[in-house]
Amino acid sequence: MEKLYEYLPRELVTFVLVTLFSLLIGLSQRKISLKREGETTLFGTDRTFTFIGILGYLLYILDPVDYRLFMGGGAILGLLLGLNYYVKQSQFHVFGVTTIIIALITYCIAPIVATQPSWFYVMVVVTVLLFTELKHTFTELAQRMKNDEMITLAKFLAISGIILPMLPNENLIPDINLTPYTVWLATVVVSGISYLSYLLRRYVFHESGILVSGIIGGLYSSTATISVLARKSRKAPAQEAPEYAAAMLLAVSMMFLRFLILIGIFSKAILAEIYPYLLIMSFVTAGVAWYLHRKRKPIPVTGEETEEEDSSNPLEFKVALIFAVLFVIFTIVTHYTLIYTGTGGLNVLSFIAGLSDITPFILNLLQGSGVAVVVVTACCMQAIVSNIAVNMCYALFFAGGKSPLRQWVLRGFGGVIAVNVCMLLFFYLL
């Protein structure tokens, strides 16, 4: 945008931009006026806001040193807006001040365009237009919020913005790379990904199908998602069994991508070594899920409401504390395993870690365990394969002994585990 000043007078370019931006804001107010036919409480629409922007520009350039005219014009505009608000409040009982604030922002566009870079004033105009149009979206969002949703957000801000910077970065135990800061940093990163997946599932994909539930849930916890889907499948028709199995595999596919993100955050060297395998595993698992989805037999649509998916909030302090405790335990166990049994013991430990939450174990390896990159990569892959087998057992257990889901779980997870074992053997042979 600044290159236009090389070919056209600066005053002309600024005037055109101020007029255009003011008109756009005024048109957004006109749209609101058309939605509320017959309403007389708006201060103005397209022409009024355009003239407000032009007036601000004229008064700004007439006194470019002391800005007395610009400030005087702003005071008069503020007085008129105040009178308008008084009339709305006394006669129509309307208490909103959004239009007043937008008018004042429009008046300030001239000095913003004249003094700030193009990205800044475009950002201001885009923000005003977006927030003007998103009123009903915010209303619907607030209606869907739980009573303690803001408390949950405050918790996340507290653990990430208050607690984390205050923690010391000194070893708790001599010769063991374990500090309060690294423990809580891992907790914050995992909690952040879990919280993001929760928000997506509740407010963006709240009316999604089974497959999307598996995808979003896999970002949080594939084990928890598979357990929930297996329990829900008990009340579903037999024809839906392939769909539930496909959703579980999609949760596993997203687990690979989640670990890819975590590894990228904590260790670029290990990421460069492991990313081809994780991507191939993710795509293969998604492919098997798509194959099972294609096997689903369509059933007639009924008017019955489906059971609401478990949308419990994962961001709780007890969950964060459990993760922190597991991280400390795996750090200590890994340290002494390497001392007394070497990398062979660490390989065995990686399979054992897969029986529980593998995230603390993998993050511990990523944060400077002193092990070679190749060994860490192998241990990560082994823990993931072991965890997939455990997830299959969870799916079979929660589905029930006579569930039609069992055969699809055995087919899907069995194929995925076989491919992952082949990938692991291929990694060993390289």
Image (spheres, rainbow, N blue to C red):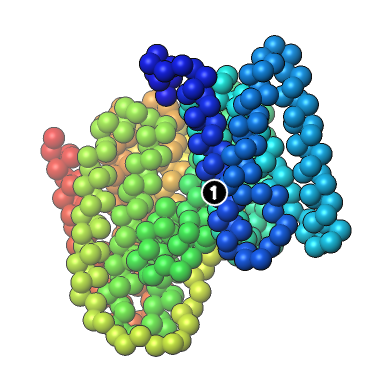
Of residues 45 and 405, the one drawn nearer to the viewer in this rendering: 45
Residue identified by numbered label 1? 27
Who's the residue at 42% across and 27% down the image?
A: 368
Who's the residue at 33% across and 72% down the image?
A: 244
Determine whether, in the image, residue 275 is placed left or right of residue 51: left
In the picture, which quadrant includes the N terminus?
Answer: top left
In the picture, which quadrant includes the C terminus?
Answer: top left
On screen, residue 290 above or below 255: below
Of residues 249 and 15, the one drawn nearer to the viewer in this rendering: 15
Determine whether, in the image, residue 222 is placed left or right of residue 287: right
Of residues 285 and 13, the one drawn nearer to the viewer in this rendering: 13
On screen, residue 299 above or below 205: below
Please provide percent x and percent y for residue 401.
35, 81
Who's the residue at 61% across and 34% down the image?
A: 53
* Residue with the most extreme right position: 90
Residue 125: quadrant of the picture: top right
Please provide percent x and percent y for residue 112.
59, 25
Please provide percent x and percent y for residue 177.
50, 27
